[in-house]
Image (cartoon, rainbow, N blue to C red):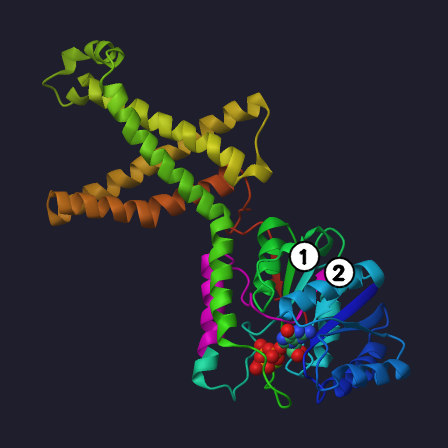
Amino acid sequence: MNIVVIIPTYNEVENIGRMLDALVGEEFPKIKKHLMKVLVVDDNSPDGTAKVVQQKMKKYKQIELLLGKKNGLGAAFARGMKYAMDKMEADAVIEMDADFQHDPQDVKRLVQGFDDGYDYVIGSRYIKGGSIPEQWEFYRKFISWGGNFFARAALMIIKIHDVTSGFKLTRVKGLLDQIDLDNLLSRSYAYKIHILYEVIKERNAKVLEVPIKFHFREKGSSKIEKEDLKESFTVVIKLFLRSRFFKFAIIGFVGFLINSVFLEIFSSLSIFDKFSSSFSYLKGTKFHAVGESTAWAAAAATEMAIISNFIFNNSWTFAKEKITSPIKLAWKFLQFNLTSIGAIVIQFIVIGSAVGVFGDTTLVRQTALVGAVVFLIIPYNYTMYNVIIWKRWRIPGLGWIQDVSVYDNIKNKRR
Ligand SMILES: Nc1nc2c(ncn2[C@@H]2O[C@H](COP(=O)(O)OP(=O)(O)OP(=O)(O)O)[C@@H](O)[C@H]2O)c(=O)[nH]1
Ligand SMILES: [Mg+2]
């Protein structure tokens, strides 16, 4: 297989020569199974980085150089990835920095993951055996850790420990070649969050995390700017707005509106009066609600919301898993109604308990309702939809559909 290590450079004259020697001279000969190549994507660095690369190209056949104008890290990688796929017949690409923060000796460990059948191998700083530079001041560590945590939480990628690593291997066939590299949300550092999102959330890649030590930059200077931080935040928010969870939330809100509108419509219809009047003998008993036409109108309005939730989640949130055959639709709709009963039970228990403990006041009822919806019903419904109705997540262990594995640092075996 052809594996292309893509190294973007901007003013890395102090690093690139040594990096190419370390990679092509020392590390590639250790990887016997594959044809290893390097693609340097230099944005016409004024410091003469490209000249050093050209010298090394005379020494090693496996190096190619792509020049262009400076458009940011993401733009450089997108350009490099397309070139590696179109011109270098890459079967996998490795994203790597020139400044020795990524250890060239780790390349073979990423390749090992590819050999073991993984599509996406992340050099991970936030698992056992991985680390960020000790020399970093608290602020930089906090930004790195906090940014990673925020992206994981907002995009619900909990199973992967390092979502902002810049050192990783990606399979081309069926994965990288499916991603629209011309329309990434970022031309800068946040491109990697977008690609990760595409790989993890939109495609069923087999993912592996391999621990790496992210070293301190010894030579040359950092290209990261304050703007990049703000941009990464925006990209995460934009991806969240595209996420399945957000669609589910919008549909849930629409369902709530439908519920309240139909409650008014139905309670003005005489059909429910007729219905309830057949239970009029229950008036004055414990079961008097059954004889109230509004109670029936409320139940019918709730069903309207359930129907709307089912239809819209099926065609939008879970478009990829869309159920179309009439028999399956009927069966799934029945399941959907049954799981919806869970929400009633949750409200029954939470509001009932709250009122029992704190007294039956509007404040207690409404607080308990909001608490039940936010902390229990939303997670409950989302889990049911993913596990039972549209089957995106696998049980046991409520596992995500992805196979995420972690390699042990020492033995390089699966934990
Ligand atoms: N071609 C190209 N390369 C870039 C650009 N910005 C950064 N790079 C390269 O991308 C790699 C990572 O950039 P760094 O500045 O080291 O980013 P960082 O590792 O997050 O920050 P430090 O820890 O401070 O080094 C390096 O090899 C840079 O030379 C760019 O706009 N174009
Ligand atoms: Mg760096």
Going 22% across and 23% down the picture, which residue do you hit? 295
In the picture, measured across the screen, residue 91 lies left or right of residue 332, that is right
Along the horizontal axis of the image, is 368 left or right of 301?
Answer: left
Q: Which amino acid does label 1 sit on?
A: Leu
Q: Return the mark for residue 297.
A: none
- x then y, percent, for residue 121: 67, 65
Q: What element carries label 1?
A: helix
Density class for disc 1 (Cα within 10 Å; few <14, some 14-19, many ≥20) is some
Q: Determine if the magenta segment contains residue 154.
A: yes
Residue 13: x, y in percent? 72, 87
Quadrant of res 259: top left
As drawn, 181 above or below 49 = above
Q: Residue 82 carries which label?
A: 2
Q: In this view, does 241 lie to the left or right of 222?
A: left
Q: What stretch is highlighted in magenta?
A: 142-171
- Is residue 164 shown above or below 244? below
Q: Which residue is identified by label 1?
A: 181
Q: Of marks 1 and 2, which one's residue comes earlier in the chain?
A: 2
Mark 2: C-beta under 8 Å from nearest atom of ligand 1: no
In the figure, is residue 122 to the left or right of 66? left
